Amino acid sequence: MVSKKDLLIMAELRNNARESLTDMSKKIHIPISTIYDRLKMNEGSLIKKHTTLIDFAKIGFYTRANMMFKVSHEQKDELKEFLMRHHSINSVFQINNGYDFLAEGIFKHIKELEDFMEGLESKFKIEAKQVYYIVDELKREAFLADRQLIEIIAKEAE
């Protein structure tokens, strides 16, 4: 089980991963050395990756979509590898309820997405697909970013 201290540290990181340990220490009342030790201890396990959230439209990628795919059992691994390696695919998830994979794709224009889908359908026997265009991002990466919620989660874990 993750400690309340670790949850508080994670909440601060999720809000601003570039915040200094000194400022973080003042906000959550945990010594700098403890924060440093916990970060090092949790790196690679609880902390999977430090990353930056980008506004893709500002660099010319105006089309984002979530795509769900179902393929024959024989092609599952091959499709997974294809999605994992494709330069336009940002995230890939294995899912259930009638589909095998959910992929988030980022493209310059809708035509590029349509070309991607056509290429995918010619390469794989897609049994079912759904494409959902992302019109506007309303909330992203907010789970466990609120220190007040940490109190509730910590109490539930007791």
Image (cartoon, grey):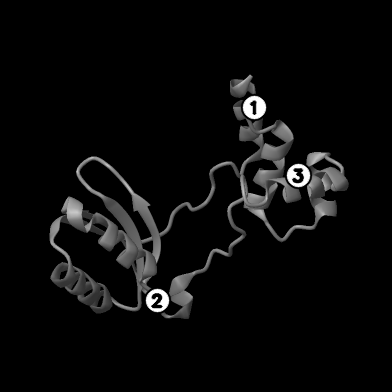
Q: Quadrant of the N terminus?
A: top right
Q: Is residue 109 left or right of residue 91?
A: left
Asked if labels 2 and 1 touch by Cβ distance under 8 angstroms, the answer is no
The image position of residue 89, as x and y in percent, is 37, 67
Which element type, helix, strand or loop, lies under badge 1? helix
Bin the neighbour count of mark 1 within 10 Å (Cα to Cα): few under 14, some 14-19, many 20 and up.
some
Amino acid on which the number 1 mark rests in the picture: Ala
Q: Which residue is mark 1?
A: 154
Amino acid on which the number 2 mark rests in the picture: Phe
Between disc 1 and disc 3, whose residue precedes?
A: 3
Bin the neighbour count of mark 3 within 10 Å (Cα to Cα): few under 14, some 14-19, many 20 and up.
some
Disc 3 from disc 2: Cα separation: 37 Å
Disc 1 from disc 3: Cα separation: 17 Å
> Given this view, does label 1 or label 2 mark the residue nearer the observer?
1
Q: Which residue is mark 2?
A: 61
Amino acid on which the number 3 mark rests in the picture: Arg
> Given this view, does label 3 or label 2 mark the residue nearer the observer?
3
Between disc 1 and disc 2, whose residue precedes?
A: 2
- Residue at 35 percent of width and 71 percent of height: 86
Q: Which residue is mark 3?
A: 38
- Residue at 75 percent of width and 58 percent of height: 19
Seen from the viewer's position, the closer of residues 19 and 38 is 38
- Residue at 22 percent of width and 48 percent of height: 99
Seen from the viewer's position, the closer of residues 37 and 9 is 37
